[in-house]
Amino acid sequence: MTFDPFGDFETAGYLQNALQLKDSIEVKESEHLAFEASIEDALAFLKNERSIGYAAVLKVHEILFSAFYPWAGRDRNELVPHLAVFKGVHGDPDSTVFEHPAQIRLAVDYALQMAGNGERFRARPGEVMGQLAFAHPFLDGNGRTLLLVFMELSFRAGFAIDWSKTQKDLYLRALSDEIRDPSTGHLDRYLQPFVVEISSREEWPGIISGIKGLDGLDKEGITYEGLDNPEIQQIYKTYRTTAKALMTGKAKAETES
């Protein structure tokens, strides 16, 4: 199944890209060129932001991908508010469900709020990254956009992740587990051995270019379903109930401690 949320793949190419490309290899290559050409501008923007909010996340995506995707900088709730997006096939127990379009901003805001507690963020970096990945704000380009945001947030908290030591498949597996079962340490346990002291921002473009798996939760295997499907509605209803219970328990634990 081609990821075609706009319903115009045959006439406009993959996600209405500026070149109307349909071939997946050509799409990846052109998208990567746009990304590489814009990394430094995106990092400079983040560096100069007094605080990182949702609007900044949207702007980073726009800077990185607007040369290839005319809709860059606009989230799923604006573009396709009627669709739920998955990694994998709906109904497969190993599939990954991303946030409901209407809740994307709240999900990102929650991740940014957690990152504001530097001590906790350093101890639980996977919790923040997992929440950002679960939000999956964009139709494509999530991994690279969110990585740049995460690197800036961790820099401000006084630490960094040595991404060169991570392994693509293990990282993506831990990330998927974190999304399915949040705040239980899946991604924290994977990332903790790679927590290091902060590095110079000037080194970041080279570091980012060498990281594998940045688009692991984009493109291949991404599917969608209409939010008018009762089964899809039940998935989000169940998630809300679970998330509420988790947050209640977390708040109680923090109060008692």
Image (cartoon, rainbow, N blue to C red):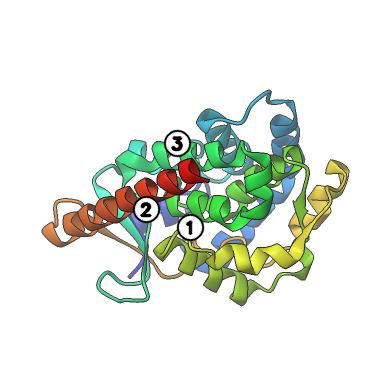
Tell whether label 1 touches label 2 (CB within 8 Å).
yes
Relative to 44, say whether 5 is above or below. below
Tell whether label 2 touches label 3 (CB within 8 Å).
no
Rounded to the nearest angstrom, the CA distance separating label 2 from label 1 is: 8 Å
Residue name at image x 58 percent, y 44 percent: 65
Rounded to the nearest angstrom, the CA distance separating label 3 from label 2 is: 30 Å
Looking at the rendering, which quadrant does residue 75 occupy?
top left
Q: Is residue 6 visible?
A: no
Q: Secondary structure at mark 3?
A: loop
For disc 3, the marked residue is 74
Relative to 165, say whether 97 is above or below. above
Instruction: Identify which amino acid the numbered label 1 is placed on.
Output: Ser
For disc 2, the marked residue is 246
Asked whether 80 or 16 is in front, the reply is 80
Q: Residue 96 location, x and y as percent?
A: 38, 66
For disc 1, the marked residue is 183
Q: Secondary structure at mark 1?
A: loop
Instruction: Identify which amino acid the numbered label 2 is placed on.
Output: Leu
Mark 1 or mark 3, which has the lower sequence index?
3
